[in-house]
Image (cartoon, rainbow, N blue to C red):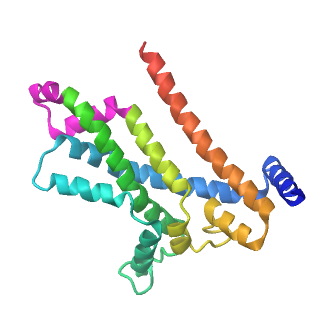
Amino acid sequence: MSDIVEGLTAAFWLVISLDPELLEISLRSLQVTLTSLVIASAIALPFGTFLAIRRFRYRRLTISVLNALMGLPPVVVGLIVYILLSRSGPFGVLGLLFTPTAMVIAQVIIITPLIASITHQAMRELWAEYHDLLISLNTSQWQRIKTLIWDGRRNLLTASLAGFGRGIGEVGAIMIVGGNIDNATRVLTTAIALETGKGDFALALALGFVLIALAISVNIAIHSLSRTEREGRW
């Protein structure tokens, strides 16, 4: 019990004193996840909305595949990206393996299906309300997508938030393509796994506190933004 208390105390002081190593790892983790989230959202939000309003031959199959990809094991994604970016892979010449860019690529692949699927569900209901109006106005497909994204932005914030949660807590794929290199690709989740294995529970706990704090802070920020916007409409 005393070891746990000592570990918690040491972790608390590491956070309070803004330990340089802790700060560096936290900032890198946030940078990688937010970059991945922006790219994934730019792809997934229009695509999910497109699936909600457009009818085409293989639409149901596309939706089924998209939903299935939500459960794609991260380690498999990491392995695929590793093979593609390795020296013998088709993109090995770019030298991206074991860099933050490789980590971003893996996270984008992991969280894009999740955001797109949630977006599709939300936009399908909104499209049922807007269908007659937008059709009568003779709007183009892109105009319909932009209209639904703008009017359904609060629901889309929730979709992006789910993607952030999935990305910030990812460890398998990140470990494979990033290599957990100190001062280069080490992020919160991989650092926690490393420090726990080394027995440095103080730093592992401190990293865990920061990870939880980041997730909670982003949640609060999103909900506050939604509440402010909603109150501004009244």
* In this view, 186 is above or below 41: below
* In this view, 3 is above or below 83: above
Is 152 contained in the magenta span?
A: yes
Is 196 contained in the magenta span?
A: no
Magenta stretch secondary structure, dominant: helix
Q: Residue furthest bottom?
A: 88
Q: Residue furthest front?
A: 1
104 or 158, nearer to the observer: 158
117 or 19, nearer to the observer: 117
Q: Quadrant of the N terminus?
A: bottom right
Q: Which residues are magenta?
A: 131-153
Q: Is residue 19 left or right of residue 42?
A: right
Does residue 21 appear in the picture of this structure?
Answer: no
Q: Is residue 103 left or right of residue 10?
A: left
**Residue depicted at 56% across the width and 71% down the height:** 175
Q: Position of residue 172 (x, y in %)?
A: 53, 68
Q: Position of residue 208 (x, y in %)?
A: 69, 55
**Residue depicted at 67% across the width and 60% down the height:** 25
67 or 77, nearer to the observer: 67
Q: Quadrant of the C terminus?
A: top left
Does residue 20 appear in the picture of this structure?
Answer: yes
Q: Position of residue 229 (x, y in %)?
A: 46, 23
Q: Position of residue 19 (x, y in %)?
A: 79, 55
**Residue depicted at 16% across the width and 30% down the height:** 131
Q: Quadrant of residue 98?
A: bottom right
